[in-house]
Amino acid sequence: MFENIWLLLLVCLFYSSWAEFISYENVRNSIMNAEEGIALGGRIMLNEKEETVNRILMETKKLELGQGLRNEKKNAAGMHFFKAKHLIDQSKVFEFIKRMPKGATLHAHNTAQVSSEWIIQNVTYNPKLYMCTNSDNVLVFTFRKHSSHNCRTSYRRVVDERKKSRDIKLFDKKLETNINLYTPTPEVKYPSTNEVWRKFQNMFTTVSDMIRFLPIFRAYHIRLLEELYEDGIMYIEMRMSFQKLYDLFGNIYSPLAIAKDLKRIVEEFKIKNAGFLGLKTIFSTHRNTDKSTVLKELDTFLKLHAAFPEFVVGFDLVGQEDIGKPLLFFADIFSVAHKSAKFFFHAGETNWYGQSTDLNLLDALLLNTTRIGHGYALIKHPILWNTVKKRDIAVEVSPISNQILGLVSDLRNHPGSFFLSQDVPMVICNDDPGFWNSKGVSYDFYYAFMSFSSYTSGLKTLKQLVWNSIKYSVLSRTEKQIAYTIVQKQWNRFIDYVMNTPLIH
């Protein structure tokens, strides 16, 4: 097919009277069809029912995009998420995506995964929770008075502070601003990437010690599983630090105990929730640290991996790439790591070109990363993105995260469009939804479908993204066979549901 397209183009270039040989419209249509054929999902064949659903979906998609074209105030696909969310919530396309089974999410950070509203209503009303303000003027939630918090204020019980307030709803709303980046004017409140990242990193400081309290750790992770399962996710690969837990009796729980406890929580959730396949963890530590610390963390990971090889599956560095140490700084450590160690490096989460951050992509590939976290700058490196295609290494794309953290204001300009058009291996992920009111992964799928993909891209694109989430997971071959069977059944039920309900008719 592609040879015929090149022949048509040569005819156009070398013959001024090419219309004598072939019609303009035929050339045009052939080129457009060829582009659709090489894009992500282009080789998927839809059955009769899926074709019917696709026609319904495309009518709705084109209607909503058409409204946005005529009225910028209704163009959710081109707006910042904080300004578009109310429009997305009313969208029939979004309703379709919400109900659609989405397979797996492969890039999720545990301490920013659960909705901030749930934390305020279900954790901060605990009478044993304290808060203080540390030396960096950051609020800290904790169940213990500990020197590591560097508090410059006294510890106050949150329930006592709430009682003192004149308006409890206003108090809770203000409290929530410490763990949610939402603002109606993001361009004013966060005028630079560094400023939004500073607030973002501070929020981890706010919640970290609170989540490390053993009873809350358990309740929080049960809620994490619930929110993702309710959004059509059947399997999760999650970054987490395995920092020691504590209780009110002075007990400290090791990373080994944490892994054992979390594994039990997941197994119990699987029993109670049909079709949920489970969760695997990727051990992560901050990139803005020294080699000796990373070596110790890598050693801890290897011990956890040896104890739970199917549960603690890989290692990563997290934190803002632009101000953290590049992968090259740690290359000597990672290049001699244990053979069983899998890497899932954050790389290329930057707007810089040719800087050390940007070149993390090169080092991630040289260090044999299993997937690439974000990979935003990959489009600038043709050798690297071609290598990604040849080695079939998936890019973990998190649209809303990239927008909120300052990489791109209009997601129609996101490199995800290029990845889709070139069928670069990719999966859609949610990163840190709890910090920006984006529960689950449906909102990210919405932007991938409405902002990244072509006006003419339909159900094939969505289906391929769902199947990719299983394909590029680290599930074993047997586990993948089970996953494909489950997701196919879920997909078939979903298709029947759409055909038999006025969901988007």
Image: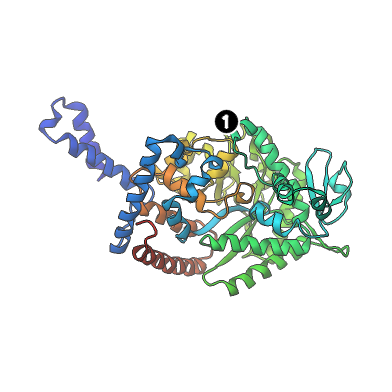
Residue at the image position 74 percent from the left and 58 percent from the top:
123
**Depth check: 495 or 271 in front?**
495
Q: Is residue 336 above or below residue 495?
A: above
Q: Quadrant of residue 159?
A: bottom right
The location of residue 256, given as percent across then percent down, is 75, 64
Crowdedness near tag 1: few (<14), some (14–19) or many (≥20) residues, C-alpha within 10 Å: some
Q: Is residue 120 left or right of residue 390?
A: right
Q: Nearer the viewer, residue 268 or 348?
A: 268
Q: Which residue is at a point 71% across and 60% down the rendered structure image? A: 122
Residue 263 percent location from the top left of the image? 67, 67
Residue bearing mark 1? 352
Left or right, residue 336 beside residue 481: right
**Image position, residue 52 (x, y; %):** 29, 59
Element at label 1: loop
Residue lying at the far left of the rendered structure:
20
Q: Name the residue at 45% across, 55% down.
A: 95
Q: Residue flagged by tag 1: what amino acid is it?
A: Trp
Q: Residue sitting at 46 percent across and 41 percent down?
A: 76
Residue 458, visible in the rendered structure? yes
Asked whether residue 325 appears in the rendered view, the answer is no
Q: How many marks?
A: 1
Measured as percent of width and height from the top left, residue 379 is found at: 47, 37
Q: Of all residues shown, which one is farthest toward the bottom?
A: 271
Nearer-the-camera pick, 154 or 484: 154
Vertical arrangement, residue 252 with respect to residue 1, above or below: below
The quadrant in which residue 139 appears is: top right
